[in-house]
Image: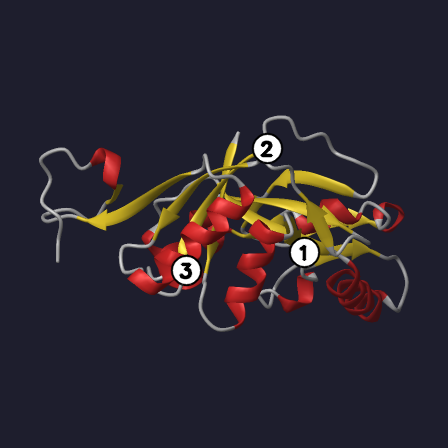
Amino acid sequence: MLLYKYRDISGAGFKNTQDIFINQKLYLPVLGSLNDPKESIAEIQIDNQYKTYGNLLEERNRKEDTRVFSLSETNRSALMWSHYAASHTGICIAFDFSDWQDTESVVLKKVCYVDTPVKMSHSSLSDYDKYAIYKESSWAYEKEWRFISRHDSFLHIGPNTIKTIFLGAKLDEASLRWVEYWRDVYNPTIEIRKMHFVTCSYELYDETELGDKVVRM
């Protein structure tokens, strides 16, 4: 199963992206630091007068205690290239997690998109991964999967986990040199492909799919 991570490789994003290749590890930020202010909202079924405050407290705790690393099923989302890869000047990394096995501390789950917050029993609060897989349906275009952990800040990957690096359509030559260096340090067999806009289409194509399509300048 290939899953994709869009990355900005400028500014603060440079160090975290380099960490993936040089140190072979993925950083899992806490839920509360993500860009959706409604992360981990759920209705905990508390049957007493403190229900409202109980829900606020549990939501705060989940946002502070739960860590996730987000990926996508697609590398062709123009919106995600814009939002997470610095307006097509970054990269998208293809990871192969076909052999992944959940552990006691880290699980891989597909995100479920819903129109209203889920309802959970108070007894299920220890199942932290159940809360982190739900997002509002307006985010469905991301086709997200998540590594979820309560304790681990980093997830280490093997030397063959990364299969392809897709370059943003607007990535510059200086950035390309860094990408090539990271690839050579991590695994020189990784394929690098450039994404392109073409005329008369809203679709993104990588360089192996262009055929007779005309690249839009």
Q: Is mark 3 on a helix, strand or loop?
A: loop
Label 3 neighbourhood size at 10 Å, few (<14), some (14-19), many (20+)?
A: many
Alpha-carbon span between mark 3 and mark 1: 18 Å
Q: Is mark 1 on a helix, strand or loop?
A: loop
Q: Quick check: marks 3 and 2 in contact, CB under 8 Å?
A: no
Residue 28 vertical position relative to residue 165 in the rendered view, above or below:
below
Residue 41 appears left or right of 95:
right
Residue 18 vertical position relative to residue 2 in the rendered view, above or below:
below
Question: Image point 86% across, 57% down: which residue?
Answer: 46
Disc assigned to residue 97:
2
**Residue 93, position in %: x, y?**
47, 46
Q: What element carries label 2?
A: loop
Amino acid beneath label 3: Ala
Residue 80 appears left or right of 129:
left
Q: Can residue 108 be seen from the camera position used here? A: yes
Disc assigned to residue 107:
none
Residue 38 appears left or right of 43:
left
Q: Can residue 35 be seen from the camera position used here? A: no
Label 2 neighbourhood size at 10 Å, few (<14), some (14-19), many (20+)?
A: some
Q: In which quarter of the image is residue 33?
A: bottom right
**Residue 182, position in %: x, y?**
49, 51
The one of 57 and 165 positioned closer to us in this rendering: 165
The one of 12 and 1 positioned closer to us in this rendering: 12
Alpha-carbon span between mark 2 and mark 1: 16 Å
Label 1 neighbourhood size at 10 Å, few (<14), some (14-19), many (20+)?
A: many
Disc assigned to residue 28:
1
Q: Earlier in the sequence, mark 3 or mark 2?
A: 3
Name the residue carrying label 3: 85
Q: What colouring does the structure picture have? A: secondary structure
Amino acid beneath label 2: Phe
